[in-house]
Amino acid sequence: MNLNPSNQTNLYGLENNLIELINLYKKNKLPNKILLSGQKGIGKSTLAYHLINFILSENEDSSYDLENFVINENNKSFKLIKNSTSQNFFLVDINDDKKVIDINQIRSLINILNKSSFNSKPRFVLIDNIEFLNTNSINALLKIIEEPNNNIFFILINNNKKILPTLTSRCLNFRLSLSNDKTFKIIKNIFGTDVNNLINEDLLNYYFTPGKICNLIKFSNDCNINLKDLNLKKFLFLLIDQSLYKKNLFIKNILYEFIEIFLIKNLLNYSNIFDYFINKIKHVKQFSLDDESLFIEFKYKLLNG
């Protein structure tokens, strides 16, 4: 299961948002600077890829299928973007081995954009996870997005995190959301069965985006874990006891969320140490401290009773 947004040829749940953006494009009113905001895993980047493919493949054979909201895998633009060889698409995202989108990535982007285009098609810059832009990166980015250029579109992806107003004020912000019912329908379309047949209801209470559910199912398949048998407490114990969070960044991030949810859910039982763990989680994240000791302490003090 490849969950990279660039490989998602089907669009689920955000069809009306795509139509809105396409209508703006057809009227020559599509903003050059777009901010897509919403929960992580809702499909913001996938929506961006579909919009970009619709525009770039407009005059190609096997162009975008707007009737079914499907990218035709045979169109040239899809293949070029998928193979990272497109002259009209540039992706900026946080690298796996770094904690921020650094200024060198923005400088590389500037060098590319300063070169002449090889064709008359629009050029698109997709900046994912913009909450990881540091101050120097933002300042460098502001300089290029403020320059007037009708043939370059910047699409920024924000996972409902706080970002500098100097950046957001220069973009038209589209806020995206999905209801739980729509989320579960999307999962059924993808996997061909109700989500309740795949994941314990106790875990489902806290998974509100299709991306998170898909990542969780992929993780469980890779590790041969039956999510139907695990409630929240058992799932937390398994992740920590077997150090599974060390193998998967998504699982490490979700482990933090689930620990906080567990504490809130059991506030009456653990009121005496609730603040202690909440503050410790905050400090570990803020100062990049050792998370293994936090997880082990949580397991022995709370999960072991």
Image (cartoon, rainbow, N blue to C red):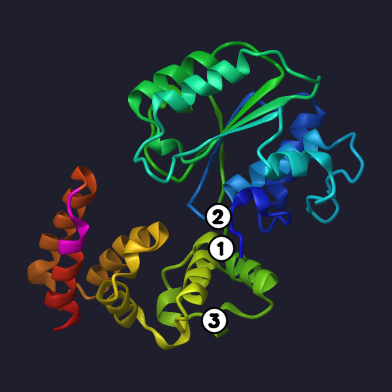
Residue pictured at 54% horizontal, 23% vertical: 109
* Alpha carbon separation for disc pair 2 and 1: 6 Å
The quarter in which the C terminus is drawn is: bottom left
* Label 1 SS: helix
**Is residue 218 toward the left or the right of residue 89 in the image?**
left
Query: Which x, y percent locates residue 26?
Result: 82, 30
Residue sitting farthest toward the right: 61
Residue pictured at 55% horizontal, 53% vertical: 177
State if disc 3 and disc 1 touch (CB < 8 Å): no
* Label 2 SS: loop
Residue denoted by label 1: 210
Which mark is on residue 195? none
Q: Which residues are magenta?
A: 289-293
Q: Amino acid at mark 3?
A: Leu
Q: Amino acid at mark 2?
A: Ile
Task: Tell me if mark 3 has few (under 14), some (14-19) or many (20+) residues whose alpha carbon lies within 10 angstroms of its own.
Answer: some
Mark found first going from the N terminus, 2 or 1: 2
Res 122 → quadrant: top right
Residue denoted by label 2: 42
Predominant secondary structure in magenta? helix
Residue 194 is at least partly visible in this image: yes
Res 137 → quadrant: top left
Residue denoted by label 3: 198
* Alpha carbon separation for disc pair 3 and 2: 19 Å
Q: Is residue 126 magenta?
A: no
Front position in the image: 47 or 77: 77
Query: Which x, y percent locates residue 147?
Result: 57, 11
Foreground mark, 3 or 2, reads: 3
Q: Amino acid at mark 1?
A: Pro
State if disc 1 and disc 2 touch (CB < 8 Å): yes
**Is residue 244 toward the left or the right of residue 60 in the image?**
left
